[in-house]
Image (cartoon, rainbow, N blue to C red):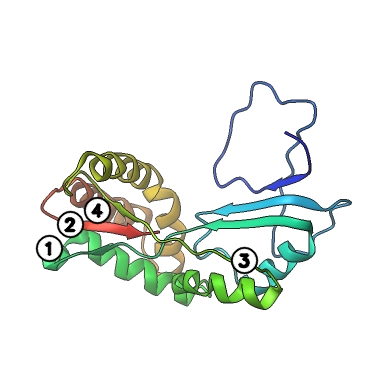
Amino acid sequence: MSGNFLLHLDSLLIISSVPPNCHFEVDDVEDEWQYKHKFDYIHGRFLVSCFKDGASVFNKAFNALNPGGYFEMQDSLTITCIDSSGEGTQLMRWVSLMLEAATKLGRDWAKVKEYKKWMEAAGFVDIKETYFAWPTNTWPRGLHYKTLGVWAGEDLKDGLEGFSMAALTRAHGWTEDEVKALLADVRRDLDDRNIHAYMPM
């Protein structure tokens, strides 16, 4: 692999060996970018509501790229259902609470819909927006979607406490025990094949 690449890690990695042409930097993308070189590729994934000012981050990415460089964002809108199977569930209660919390904390989850507009405003060209549906378990038909459901559901359950605790305790004033009690019910709902939920990606 050649060129300069900016990778922002969204989870802790344990690295036993690093190629000599690779190093990692931990930084806040909303601060001024002080890199001494330009990049060929900048990638962000599952950053959802972490930006206070997403448009400025997209501008920084554009200005930090070499001519012909690529900026890729992969993200999710909030979990929804294809039918009424989610009504009254703890899963959909959690979704509602998380949306309220993100908005209260100035990190509106719905801003993911703005990515294409922010790219255009920053000066990017040849922008391609692709939509996917990731089921939360094996409820849909077909091996492809069942496999996606296994992966997405397990990933979601693994990260549930990590991205719920701060939001629910800070925005709603919940205790840690109250959050954990809700999340136990949410995990059960995520495994319930009668709830036809998915993540719009």
The residue lying toward the viewer, choosing from 192 and 115, is 115
10 Å crowding of disc 4: few (<14), some (14-19), many (20+): many
Give the residue drawn at x 52%, y 71%.
107
Q: CA distance from mark 1 to mark 4?
A: 14 Å
**33 shown above or below 23:** below
Rendering coords of residue 47 (x, y %): 53, 58
Return the residue at label 1. Answer: 85
Q: Amino acid at mark 2?
A: His
Q: Is residue 23 in view from this perspective? A: yes
Tell me which numbered mark, 1 or 4, is placed earlier along the sequence: 1
Q: Residue at x 23, y 58 (%)?
A: 197
Q: Position of residue 96 (x, y in %)?
A: 30, 70
User: Where does label 4 land, which residue?
Assistant: 186
What's the CA distance linking mark 2 and mark 3?
Answer: 35 Å
Q: Which mark is residue 126?
A: 3
Q: Nearer the viewer, residue 21 or 2?
A: 2
Mark identifier at residue 44: none
